[in-house]
Structure formats: C-alpha cells, structure tokens
Image: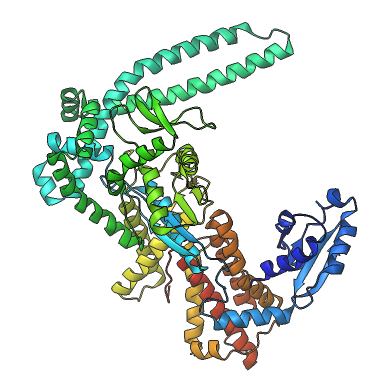
Amino acid sequence: MNALSEIKSRFDRVLNQMVDDPSKLLDMIRPAQDSKFGDYQANCAMPMKSMMGQPPRQIAEQITSQLVIDDLCSSVEIAGPGFINLKLDDEWLKHRLTKALQDPCLGIQPVEAPGTYVIDFSSPNVAKPMHVGHIRSTLIGDGLAKTLRFVGHNVITDNHLGDWGTQFGMIIYGYKHFVDADAYSENPVGELGRLYKRVRQIMDFHAARDQLPVIEERRVNLNAELEKLESVGESGNPAVDKKNRKEIGRLKGKISEQREQVAELESKIAAVRSDAELLQQAEQHADIASEVLTETAKLHSDDAENLALWNEFLPCCREDIRRIYDRLGIKFDHELGESFYHNQLPGVVQSLGDKGLSRESEGATCVFMDNYDTPMIIRKKDGAFLYATTDLATIQYRVEQWKPTTILYVVDHRQHQHFEKLFDAARLWGFSDIEMRHVSFGTVLGDDGKPFKTRSGDTVGLEGLVDEAVRRAAQLAGELNSEMDEMTLEDIAQVIGIGGLKYADLSQNRSSDYKFSYDKMLALKGNTATYLQYSYARVQGILRKGDVDVAAMRTNPVEFRFENEVERKLGISLIRFGETLDEVLVDYKLNLLASYLFELAQTFSVFFESCPVLKNDDGDLKRSRLQLCDLTARTIQTGLSLLGIGVVEKM
C-alpha cells in the first residue's frame, strides 16, 4: 500500500456517491508541489462545479465531511476556491518507513492482478555493428522489463533480431565481389561490416545520381513559382495578401527542404568520386540495387550457396552483438530473429486470405483497412514477403506460446505508422483481446542538433560509445581516488561509465530527442547517475565509519524521529518510491523514476548537511538518522538497478 493509492481509494468511496465515473477526478489527487500545502492535494472539486451546479468550495466541504481518512492523515484542510490539502499522520509515516526498512523490497507490494508482458526491444540488424541508434530501444526495453518484474508482473523479453532481410543480401553480394579474404579471416565481423558499408555506399551513389536531376528540376520550378509570387507584391486585398504570404512561406520551406536533399545527395556522390577504387567499383556495378534483391530472394528461397554463407556469417555476427550486450548487462529470455518465422509466412498470408481480410492488388497480396489510404502489403508481386508479414507471424507465435496480456514494442518514433497499421491488422485477424503498444522514442542528437555522428559523418558505434564513457569515468575515478589500486579503479570506471551512459538516456523523456554530452553524463552535480552513485557511496561511508551493524539495525529498528523538518521531508520522499513506479508504468516513462531518484538524492543532501548523524549524542536519534541513511541508499540502489545501473561502495 502506498499513500497516494490509499488516499485515492478513500476519495473513491466518497466520489462514487456523487458522480457516475470518478476516475478522472481521482487523477487530480497528486503530491503537493509545495510542502506548505501539505503532502498531497486533491483538486477534484473544481471540475465538479459543472456536474453539480455548486461552488467548488461547497463541493469540497461535502467531500471532506464524508471522507474517512483520520488513520492516514493528521489534517485535511480546504484552501482557496476548493483545494483539499492533506498531511500524512506522522505515526502512519513512521510505520511505513519501518516496514520499508525491514522489507527487502522496500515495502513495495506486488500488483494485485499481475499480467504477462512480452517486451520486444533492441532488435538490431545483425549484419552490421550496433550503433548509437540502438541504445534507446535497448535501455528503455531493459528498464521496463526490470520495473514490471519488480512490481510483480510476468515478463518475457524477446530480441527480434534482423537476421534475414535485405541487409544479408547486401553482405552476400559484397562478399562475392569485394571481400578482402585476409581481413575476413582475421576479423570476420569487421570485414562484413566494411562490406555492408561498401555496398550501401555504391547503392546510395547510383540512387543519388538518379534522384539529383529530378530534385534539381523541382527546385528550379519552385523558385520560379516563388519569384512570380514575390513579384506580385501587395494587392491591397487583405484576404488575398494573407493567402499569398502563406503560399510564399510554404514555397520557401519546400525550397529549403529540397536544398538539404540536394546537399545530402551531392555528399553521397562526392564520397564515392573522391575514392578512385570505390568509384571504379561503382561504375562496374551499376545494377547493384537489383542484384542485391536477387541475392536476398535466393537466400529466402533456400539457395544452397547463399544459405551456406548466411549460416557462416550469422554466428560471428550474433557473438559480436552478444559481447556488447554483456558489457551493458543486457539479457533476453528469447532472441527469435526474422529467420525463425520464415517458414510461417505462407501460412499467415493463407490465413488472412481465408478470413477474407486480404485480396490481390496489382499482383500483390494486401490487407485493406478503412482507416488507411494505403493497404498493408503482405506479399509482393514477385512472391517476396515483407516486414509486416513477419510481424504478424510474430504476434501469432507470441500469443500461442506465451499468452500475453500486453505486447510492448520499444521502437523509434519513425515506425509509428507501421505499428498502427500492424496492430489494426492483427486485431482484425483475431487478436483483439491483447493490448499492443508502440513504446516510441526520439533521437540521440549531437551538439549540432542533428543525429549523433562521428566527425567523419559516420553513425557512432555503440561499442565505441561505451569505450569512451568508461575511459572518461576512469579519468574521473582516478582524480577522486588517487591512492586506489588500478584494478579497483577499473571496476569503478566500468560501473560509473556505463551507468552514466545509461542514465544520460533514461533520464530523458523517451518521446523527445536529446543532445548527448559526455561531460554532462559524468558530472558530479546535477541529474546524473554519477551524482546518485556518489550519494549511495556517501551513505556507505557513513555506515563504515560508524561501524554500523546494518543487518541488526534493519531487524530491530528504533522508532523514527522527526526532530528536523528535513527528516520528515526525507521520509515522505522515501515512501513515494512505490507511487513513482506506478506512475512510470502508466505511460512507460522511465525518466519519472530518474527524476524521483534525483530529487531523493537532493533531499538527502540537505538532510546530510542539516542533521548530524554520527556526531549526535542522542543514541535513538542517531539510530533513527542512520536508518534514514540506509533506507535512502537502498532506495537509490534499487531504483538504479531497475534502470540497469550499478553502484559502488566508494567513489
């Protein structure tokens, strides 16, 4: 039981007698923003004015007169036009803190109705090295899995690897035409990555050369339209002039957009032309795009040569990815890639056809749905299947094997339309009683506000990102601990560096883009993992210095005391851990947990400066404050662990 849910439960009993559906009103009961207004505030009386035709303050009086909450709150006051302010009873608060201190789970009770969650996250294409673009899906998915498990849900994680698509056709083509045998023998994954990049460059070169004249012609035409409109000037008719200004703005936006497209295409062409060997290969492989599709189709039709190459490439690719997961501490229950579902795809198409949900259109098999302008193609004219077909087969398998109540797809926001259409098609197919949710996220940006790249313009490799984070953490740890041995410093650097990298991502609202900064990531001040880890280590230092028997203190605690207002404030913050986890899982936003931990650490810092602990002569007060210290450290440690972040005993 957490305070907020219990307060809502008490209000629910009253509001149910006053309105038909109090759910939205209950959402207006929140922790108070300012402690002078109490610990919690209920603002539900204001919107009830239109329902009941009475002043909000009068409604608030009716609510409080029927509210049975004396055992939980020491005061319930009406303020202003009808705000209801509540202050927790100190004895109740002390009891909750004691229960949390004695409980390995910090007093967090398992959910009453546990569900089964399948979480689809990370899901890289195994044919190329993991890069910074994979970090958000990987970390958000792992954090959600840990949090859902902690509160009592059954969680199944599945890494839906891209191990069967066009990228393997690209690598097979590259291997057949451009492989460096010695490099492949020495470092297979590195050479396969180079081959993928080489084929991609050549394909982009030819596509850019074809597209550039078309876009240039469009830009010339748009410029002509713009010049014509601008030459007209003001007509004196406000409506006409407003319309012209709007059109001029639209044309300028289009021209700017196409200018950027031209620059990007010219850059791709220049990159090939500046490399004599690459240019020669590009000229010799003018049909590379269609040839790659041919190699992919051969693989999918079980061509012996291509299948043998795929079986040769796949294990080393997967091992390379697994090595990075191990460094990040990421584990999956299953890693069922696209290839796993390959043999099921004809049955998916057949089933949709049998149910009258698909039909042929221009030679392709499509699912048409009323809410979309275009259909979902599930088999192309040449017989090839698409990602949508595989995704439908995946849903069918997961439901049959794991019987989930909810499937979460942690995938970037650019796939929003795909998942909307996929979920609607799956519901039509018969999977209407399962919640399917796209947990989308924004992009990691560099200082220039564009997707984070290396100086050469390449996508930043994930392993390189981890290496740099650990290197910088080692430098920081060495500055803080000049006398610590090298092996211990290295261990600390791993925890701080990787923790900082994870927290820098997870502390952001997942829906937003964010700018990545190594310097901010490892700062000792501000909302960083390093600050939280330092807060944890500070408590461990207090406990060591005081030679505290922590196990005995937790088993036989003294009564908590609030001699200083900040002690009570810290206690309130500690019991809100469960409320925070509930809030996180409403919309799957882990940044709410990060914000809570940061605020808890800030409150502890004020407590540490204001309330002497080891130097206190009052034995019971000293013990009470040690208990608050211990409970704070455990809450920070547990919260960080849900984000996949470790702690260190010394910093």
Apparent side of residue 646 relative to residue 489 in the rendered image (left or right):
right
User: x, y (%) of residue 253?
Assistant: 53, 23
Residue at position x 57%, y 84% in the image: 626
Which residue occupies the extreme front position in the image? 354
Left of 259 or right of it: where is 234? right
Q: Is residue 526 visible?
A: no
Residue 23 location (% of width, % of height)? 71, 56
Judge whether 468 appears above or below 541 on screen.
above
Query: Which residue is at the front of the view, 514 or 7?
Result: 7
State the residue at coordinates (54%, 18%). 251
Q: Nearer the viewer, residue 371 or 323?
A: 371
Which part of the image, by quadrant, shows the C terminus? bottom left
| 583 versus 136 height, above or below | below
Residue sitting nearer the eye, 258 or 302: 302
- The mark total stands at 0
Kindly indicate the quadrant of the structure image that contains residue 43.
bottom right
Whether residue 378 is visible here, answered yes or no, is yes
Residue visible at 38% across and 16% down?
Answer: 214
Q: Position of residue 289 (x, y in %)?
A: 25, 28
Measuring 82% from the left and 53% from the top, which residue is drawn there? 46
